[in-house]
Amino acid sequence: MKKCPFCAEEIQDDAVKCRHCKEFLAGRAQSEAQASRPWYFRTPTVIGMILCLLALALPLVWWNPYYSRKTKIIVTVIVVVVTYLTWVATAQTLKMLQEYYKFL
Ligand SMILES: [Zn+2]
């Protein structure tokens, strides 16, 4: 049991909403913390940038003070792999196109 920070009544440890005063606890604090971040450090922005810019979006991840070092490393590895695969696929497509044009 813990105390509700709004009404000081006893509530369950993993309660999301206080049953006495109907205030939201952890969920509300978390979404407020997310909303107070600058837009370029919010997770949807960072993911969107990565999808558009791939490796060019990495500084946004590394400068983000809200991500742990582990998260940064995992994201970097994923982005590098995806960028590499995209590059290989593009190179192969160009090669195929070149060979295709030779037949014309
Ligand atoms: Zn309460």
Image (spheres, rainbow, N blue to C red):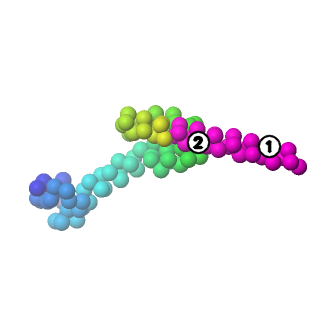
Categorize mark 2 by other alpha carbons within 10 Å: few (<14), some (14-19), many (20+): few
Residue drawn 53% across and 39% down?
81
Q: Count the numbered circles shown.
A: 2
Mark 1: secondary structure = helix
Amino acid of disc 1? Gln
Categorize mark 1 by other alpha carbons within 10 Å: few (<14), some (14-19), many (20+): few
Left or right? Give the position of 27 relative to 83.
Answer: left
Reading the image, the residue beneath label 1 is 98
Q: Main secondary structure of the magenta part?
A: helix
Expressed as whole percent of the image width and height from the top left, the position of residue 79 reads 52, 40
Q: Which of 86 and 70 lies nearest the eye of the viewer? A: 86
Is residue 38 covered in magenta? Answer: no
Say which quarter of the image contains residue 94: top right
Q: Quadrant of ligand 1?
A: bottom left
Quarter containing the N terminus: bottom left
Mark 1 / mark 2, whichever is N-terminal: 2
Is residue 85 covered in magenta? Answer: yes
Reading the image, the residue beneath label 2 is 85
Ligand 1 closer than 8 Å to the CB at disc 2? Answer: no
The answer to whether the residue labelled 1 contacts the one labelled 2, judged by CB atoms less than 8 Å apart, is no
Left or right? Give the position of 8 relative to 37.
Answer: left
Tell me the magenta residue range. 79-104
Expressed as whole percent of the image width and height from the top left, the position of residue 69 reads 38, 34
